[in-house]
Amino acid sequence: MLCLGSASPRRSALLRQIGVPHCVHAVEVDETPFAGEAPDDYVLRLAAAKARAVLVARAAGPAAALPVLGADTTVAIDGVVLGKPADAAESAAMLARLGGREHEVLSAVALAVTDRAGGQRVTTRLSRTRVRFRAVTPAEAAAYWATGEPRDKAGGYGIQGYGAVFVASIAGSYSGVVGLPLAETAELLRDAGVPLWDGAA
């Protein structure tokens, strides 16, 4: 039915949650923001780039006709994109910056399909969620880094894991903060004729 262009087990689990059978084909794309690029433009660009890259990579294979779902999620505060922390010091700095304040989690999804003429068509949607953190102490930041969870998370935390203890409130899409906004994803899939709630998922 669908190819997920991401190695994220969380995104795969969210697709299974809404009953969408899928295969997984992850690709590496350069995630460096462009100079002056707005955070929403950044996540939309990366989601589309991932979907296109998988569509090209699978063009000669047996599943070439499958639509490809790409996704990207980032944390933004003060107009600055916070990526994945490189080390404990950067992780602590991120949590200190987020602590006691509200930030945005931007999650983009892109669906790439090949039309009958062989051309590519990519459609995107964006989810924007406001998350407020309580204050985070340096000791908590150090202990959180030691769990290993922040290492592969945009903004240095996972709301679905240990990082949930820092979240005081959320306004928007919980699944979007996890990494795949399901309302927007379902809209894209319906428009492409991909059924939801399939018992075979």
Image: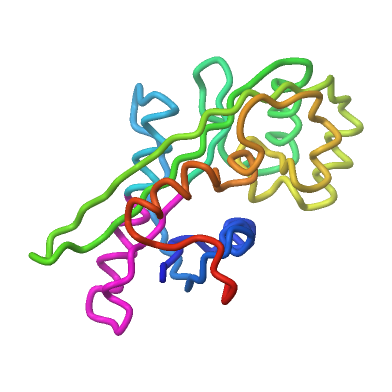
Q: Quadrant of the C terminus?
A: bottom right
* Residue 66 belongs to the span the image colors magenta: yes
Q: Residue at x 23, y 80 (%)?
A: 60
- Picture colour scheme: rainbow
Residue 123: x, y in percent? 30, 46
Report which quarter residue 92 is drawn in.
Answer: top right
Specify whether 100 is left or right of 37. right
Count of numbered circles in the view: 0
Residue 104 pos. (x, y %): 59, 25
Residue 157 place in picture, x, y as percent: 71, 40
The residue lying at 84 percent from left, 25 percent from top is 136
Pick the front one: 89 or 39: 39
Residue at figure coordinates x 40%, y 39% from the top left? 125
Check the image and report above or below for 17 versus 97: below
Q: Where is residue 101 in the image (x, y as percent from the top left)?
A: 72, 15
Q: Quadrant of the N terminus?
A: bottom left
- Which residue in the rendered view is the most extreme toward the right? 139
The question of residue 154 being in magenta is answered with: no
Range of residues picked out in magenta: 49-71
| Up/down of 134 relative to 123, above or below | above
Residue at (27%, 75%) from the top-left corner?
A: 64
Left or right position of 69 against 89? left
Residue farthest to the bottom, as pictured: 62
